Every structure is written in C-alpha cells, then in structure tokens.
Image: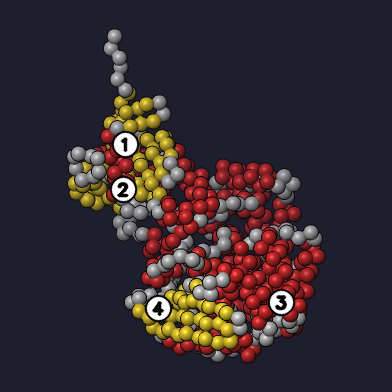
Amino acid sequence: MVVPGPERRLAAVLAADMVGYSRLMEVDETGTLARLKTHRIELIDPAIAKNRGRIIKTTGDGMLVEFHSVADAVLCAAEVQRRMARRNADISPARWIQFRIGINLGDVIVEENDIFGDGVNVAARLEMLAEPGGICVSGAVRDQVGDRLDDLAFEDLGDQSVKNIARPIRVFRVRLDPEPKTAPEALKAATPTSKKPSIAVLPLVNMSGDPEQEFFADGLSEDIITELSRFHDLLVISRNSTFVHKGKAVKVQEVAREFGVDYVLEGSVRKAGDRVRVTVQLIDAETDRHVWAERYDRKLEDIFALQDEMTRAIVATLPGRVEAATHDRAKRKPTDNMAAYECVLAAKVLHHRSTRQDNAEAQRLLDRALALDPNYAHAHAWKACVLGQTWVYSWCADRDATFQQVAAELEITLALDDNDSDVHRILAALNLNRDDHEKAAYHQERALALNPNYDLVVVQQGELLTWLGRPEEGIDWIKRAMRLNPYHPERFWSHLGRACYCAEKYAEAAEAFSRITRPDHAHHAFLAATFAQMGNAVAATAHAAEVLKREPKFSVAAYLATQHYKREVDRERHEAGLLKAGLPA
C-alpha cells in the first residue's frame, strides 16, 4: 500500500510582524496590548476577511495568513499599511504601531490547520526586509500581479541573500502611492510644526539620596514647565509627555526627535534642610550643543525667585522674540510657607497618578498646606482639581456635594488670586456643565491667556468651540493640544471625534473614536451615530447594541440632556444620527 505524502498546495502567504513590540510593551504593556487588539478588531481582521484570507496563526507581535489569490494578498497588505499610516498620523512617533509585511507565492505543506515549507519561510524573510509600514514581495508575486493593481507600483530591489534560504530571492518593494507619503510626513501634515522656539523639559534628577525628595524634584520640574508655558511665543511640551522618560538614560537628540522640539532642558536638584541646589543645562537638539548652563544654590524660601530667574535666562537664550510682558509673578500670589509649598508639589504628583489611594493622599497633603497657609491660592486651586478628580471617577460618596465643594474652592481661589490658569480652566468646565456658555467662554479665555501652552487648557478650548458651534476651529485647537502632549490622555481623541462629528467629518470622527482602547457606552453611542450618518448600517447597529449592552436603560433624550450644544442645529444632528442607528428615543 502506498502511504500518501503530506498535502501540498500553491498558496499566497502573507507574513506580518509588529515593529518595536518589545520597546512598546516595556513602556506601556496594557495600553499597547489594548491598541493592538483594537487595530485587529477594527482594521486588520476585517481587511483579511474582505480579501478572502485565512489567518493560520498569530503570535504576540505577528501573524501568518494564507490567500488563494496573490492579488487579494497584496490588496489586503496595502489596505492595512495605508490605514495604519493614517491611524499613526496624530500620534507621537514613539507610540506608533507599525507592521512589516512580506508576501510570497510558493509551495506549502498543509498539516491540519497549519502550513509549513519553503513558501512560508520565504514570506517570513521578505517581511524582515520590509521597512516599518512597508511591504516586500517575491518575484513570483510581482509576476503574477503584473499591472493589474492600478494604485500600486513595484520597485525592484534585485536579488537578496536571506538567512536559511540557499538561493538568492528576487525582491520587490510595494510602493503604495506614486509619491509615497510616509507616516512621518502624514504626521507633519496633520500637525504643522510651529515657527515658535520649542522646548521639552526632562524631569530633574533627585540627587539628594533621599527617595522622599522625589516628590520635590518632580514637583519642581512641573513648576519649571508651568513657568515656561506662560510665554506665548514659546512651545512647551507638557509634563505628561516628558515624564515618560523619568528615571531612564536618554539621548537628547532622540528625545528632541520624539517630541519635535528645538531644545531640551535637563538637570538635577538636591534639597537638604532649608537649602536647595538646582543644576540645569539647555541643549540645542540639532547640534547637541550646550547653549546655556547654570547652577543655583539658594535657600528654599527663594525657590520662586529661582524659578523666575531660570525661566527668564532660558527664554533670553532662545533665538527670536519671546515676550516677557505676560510673565509677571508679581501678579500671582505664591506662599511664604515652604512646608505648604512642598505639600502642594507632592499633591500634584500624586494627582497625576489618577488612582483613588493617591487622590486621597493628595487631599490630605492639600489640607495640610491650607492649614499652614489658609490664603495659599494655588493650594485651594489644586484642592478643587483633586476633588474634581473624585467627582469625575465617582470616588466620592455624594457627587452633588462634591461638585458644590469644587465650586466653593474655586470661588475662594478666585478671591485670593485671579491669575491662576487652573482655576479658570476648571471654572470654564464647571460653567459649561451648567450650560452657561458665556461664563465658560470668559474663564476659558482667561485660562488661555494665563497659560497658552497648558495642554488641558488648549484641548478645552477646542472642546468649548465645538459646543459653541465652531467645530472647525475646535479641531485645530485639539490637534495643537496633541502636539503639546504627544502622550495625551485618550479623552483627547474623544474631543476630536466630537468636533469632527459636529463638523460633519464623519470618517475622521470614526477614526478618532477608534483610538479609544476602552470605550464606554457614550463612545459607542457616538460611533453608532457616526456610522449611521455615513450610511454604514451594519457598523451602526453593532455599536448601538454595545450601547444597550452597557447601559440597558439608555435613551436618546436622556443622553442628549447631558450634552452642552449651544446651537439647536448641532443637537439635532447628533439626535438624528442616534435615532438612525436604531437607539431608543
């Protein structure tokens, strides 16, 4: 009896691998996995299914896919790479998720649900030759496709010797456009670079040898960023982005490239008793040259004067006109109590961690600061911030009472000091929540004038303009906030999605909302309305089902009562999309 050999067949094999997977996992494991899962669900798997592909197997950072048609395999790869480039357009390069893809046409051995053999091995080697975001194919694939795919071109890379394949492989690079636009160019188009001098401030290194002084070092770093942010003619990257490098050895030119800035400030702080020593240096990122350095050795009570002196020296060193008129500490009222100041520094750092336990500790520190100096306006402002966080995350027993407490703290701060951007930022949000658009606009304007580089103020400007019926302007402000903070919170995407929906840019709205890794019922409601407006009934129905799954009592009327549109036409547009998606009135 003749024993049949293994089944063989000719197949188009696509091998894909994620670029920089280990680095991204190290920086943000949960976020990377969530974003990768979202890309799979919304983009990659549907593109494979649409082009009649079959996923053979997946690894954490890659996959192997079989197609019966070579053209289908190439079309699938092109769609994935083009759409991924668009998804990366508004994200810091450090957070891009990109794939390399290789495609081969060859003989494969079939064993149960897996495939092996030379055809698979060559596809894997082609993938390794591809650039991030690129596609490489074998000569056999190029010959089969020919000129049938109008919007694709092939660039001959010649014969290549690859690992574990004895013969040279003829390799072609797929050009997705006649004038290919790489992801960096897409980013450049989406967020025009400012002509202002731009700077990133790295966290000051704690040199005291006392871990307890980390709060002081981090808080002082944040204060320096805040002081520099007040200069209108300077672009300053937010602390949320630069602090991702805390505790790491970094190369200044890589940091500058990541954030797209001209200058980087780095340094250290040593605090002992009532004295503090701060050493800083300003580096021209393009030449990697020190343009200014200074060591300050002062009493702790001189910390505010030290900050003023440092920021003025930095802006005086930068080329171009950086105005000093708006930077006048005499208009603002710091404290004379250094223990209270240290409590506020530590409370800010804890607040940024966004956990219930850290929030409670931040409240305790702020209460301590206010006991030491009841007239410390900035402490009252941050008490309102921290209480506002408990309201947002429902970490409080009585939300209505907490909301009133936030308002009370803000009124106290306003009476003590009318020049705190955080106070006006929160008052703008509070008045918007009351649908008082005029008061919200007044406080928002004050916040923006006081700190034009504060990403939370800038994104809120975009949000407010959307509610006022000026979404096109809102989109520009939100994208500017994303430039100031490349590691921005996911809610920035929500603001952008809302603005795009209001501007009737539905494809852009869907794209923005798709970036949210843990969407709640409100995000699904917006996606349902968006896809309904685009005429995609299948997607609209699926998102509407998610809304009702998460919020069974959802009604369009109750939901719209929580929205803050000033113009009825904007509210009606939102209502129409929700009802068209099949959500209950």
Question: Which of pointers 1 and 4 lies earlier in the amino acid sequence?
Answer: 1
Q: Position of residue 164 (x, y in %)?
A: 24, 40
Residue depicted at x 76% and y 81%: 374
C-alpha span from label 2 to label 3: 57 Å
Which residue lies under the disc numbered 1? 120
| Number of the label disc, if any, that sits on residue 128 | 2
Which residue lies under the disc numbered 3? 369
Q: Is 403 positioned to the left or the right of 230 in the image?
A: right
Question: Which of pointers 2 and 4 lies earlier in the amino acid sequence?
Answer: 2
C-alpha span from label 4 to label 3: 36 Å
Image height of 439 relative to 125, above or below = below
Q: Position of residue 300 (x, y in %)?
A: 60, 84
Q: Residue furthest top?
A: 1
Q: Which amino acid type is marked by label 1?
A: Val
* Disc 3 secondary structure class: helix
Which residue lies under the disc numbered 4? 283
* Disc 2 secondary structure class: helix
Q: Which amino acid type is marked by label 3?
A: Ala
Q: Is 126 positioned to the left or the right of 191 in the image?
A: left
Q: Residues within 10 Å of mark 4 (few under 14, many from 20)?
A: many
Q: Is 180 positioned to the left or the right of 399 in the image?
A: left
Residue depicted at x 35% and y 76%: 288
Q: Which amino acid type is marked by label 4?
A: Ile
Question: Which of pointers 2 and 1 lies earlier in the amino acid sequence?
Answer: 1
